Image (cartoon, rainbow, N blue to C red):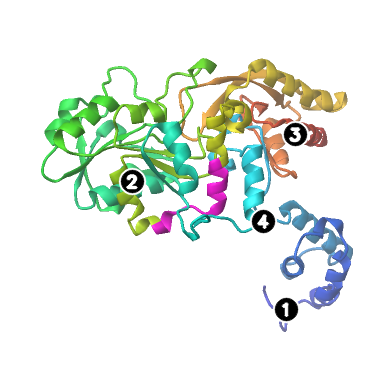
Amino acid sequence: MPPAGKGADPAVQAALRRLPAVDALLGAVAGEAALADVSRRRVTEAVRAALDDERRRLLAGGAGEPASAAMLAARVVAGLAREGAFSLARVINATGVVLHTNLGRSLLSPLARARLAEVAAAYSNLEMDVAAKERGSRYAHVQGLLRRLTGAPASLVVNNNAAAVLLALETLARGKEVVVSRGELIEIGGEFRIPDIMRRSGALLREVGTTNRTHLKDYAQAIGPETGLLLKVHTSNYRVVGFTAAVGSRELAELGRARGVPVMEDLGSGSLLDLRPYGFPHEPTVPEVVAEGVDLVTFSGDKLLGGPQAGLVVGRADLVDRLAHNPLNRALRIDKLTVAALEATLTAYERGDARETLPTLRLLTESLVSIRRRARAVLARVPAEARRALGAALAETTSQVGGGALPTVELPTAAVALGTAARPAQGLDEALRAGRPPVLARVVDDRLLLDCRTVLAADVPALAQAIARLA
């Protein structure tokens, strides 16, 4: 903050002296309901910042009288109310992207949330064999579930799928070659690149084939004394179409067995459920890939599985055991909350009610009729005058799966469309994002689309209120 030293304009000096003291301004905001959950330290910091801003304005030649204590208090309260008591906060997802990485991906099921609350509030048998009164394994709580659901004899869970890939490469192929198709050297969100992960693991990349065509003979010719692993990677967020060729999981697994080289497949999103009955194209499920004979399969817990962020590894017991005993695993391990939520998620698959109880699967497979009904419910709650002012109308469009999964799939959906010449979509978008809770939507052809596939039923009243406030 610039000092008000000698030579400063006497009028400016007088204005600076009329600014309220910090304690006076703290007293002016005391008792405000909007600040009930905000710490005094944070309020004090906001008060000092508001006073500093006003001093800068006056020293820069700002016109008029200094802001009154009431005006400054109102600024402090408004700013802190916008920010909220916590930085990580609920938003309304009206983007139509079900697995939106920036918005937290999968929503947890009621059972998972209940299990989180129970385990978080008390001590648990996380790493205790209570019957034997001996140390147990945190992975034991999900190993049986994963064995029954995937058909793989062994499993391990780390904090995300990138960690699972890194751990497997470092354990099985450090200082050795990993053979992978050029068409599978992917980059996904957050600049996760297979070649970069391979370098970090200490493995040596051995590319085979071409971007669009790789054959079994390419892998076979690349295998030598220095080969540590054959790696197959799901392309996740893109597809190569046209004149293409790729080696299937079974073929690669058979080659690996014949040559004594482990085969690993990174499925990325990874699903335990075949979604073809709901109109999706075929995607290899984890049980299918395990049945093809692949030695290790890695996949995410918070994408198509519909659970918490985690990286799951299933496969041969001897290989999984090597991963578990790698010191790096300690740095990548999951905590009790992840174990609780993952166990609940996997239990839904074993019970057979995953599609009904896991929000991700329910949102992905919901019918257009049902989504359209929810969009109409939003519109019905917005006053007619506000609807006219904003040009609000029902629109049919498409949603995306998100999270790098099923990139070519477009899901039919219904949205509330807003925007007029007087109230352009961009401005409405900014206003909705500034609200509490923020509403995230997408602008298409000068219209703001609030895609109701990802608008939860519980969010309908709040979304309607946010739209009404725009008018």
Q: Earlier in the sequence, mark 4 or mark 3?
A: 4
Residue 68: % across, % down: 87, 65
Residue 410 appears in the picture as rendered: yes
Residue 68 appears in the picture as rendered: no
Q: Which stretch appears magenta?
A: 330-343
The dot on residue 165 is none
Local crowd at mark 4 within 10 Å, few (<14), some, or many (≥20)?
A: few
Q: Earlier in the sequence, mark 4 or mark 2?
A: 4
Main SS type for the magenta part? Answer: helix
Q: What's the CA distance linking mark 4 and mark 2?
A: 32 Å
Q: Earlier in the sequence, mark 4 or mark 1?
A: 1
Disc 2 residue type? Val
Disc 1 residue type? Ala
Q: What's the CA distance linking mark 3 and mark 1?
A: 53 Å
**Which residue is painted at 43% across and 42% down in the image?**
312
Q: What's the CA distance linking mark 1 and mark 2?
A: 68 Å
Q: Secondary structure at mark 4?
A: loop
- The mark closer to the camera, 3 or 2, is 2
- According to the picture, the residue beneath numbered tag 3 turns out to be 458
- According to the picture, the residue beneath numbered tag 1 turns out to be 4
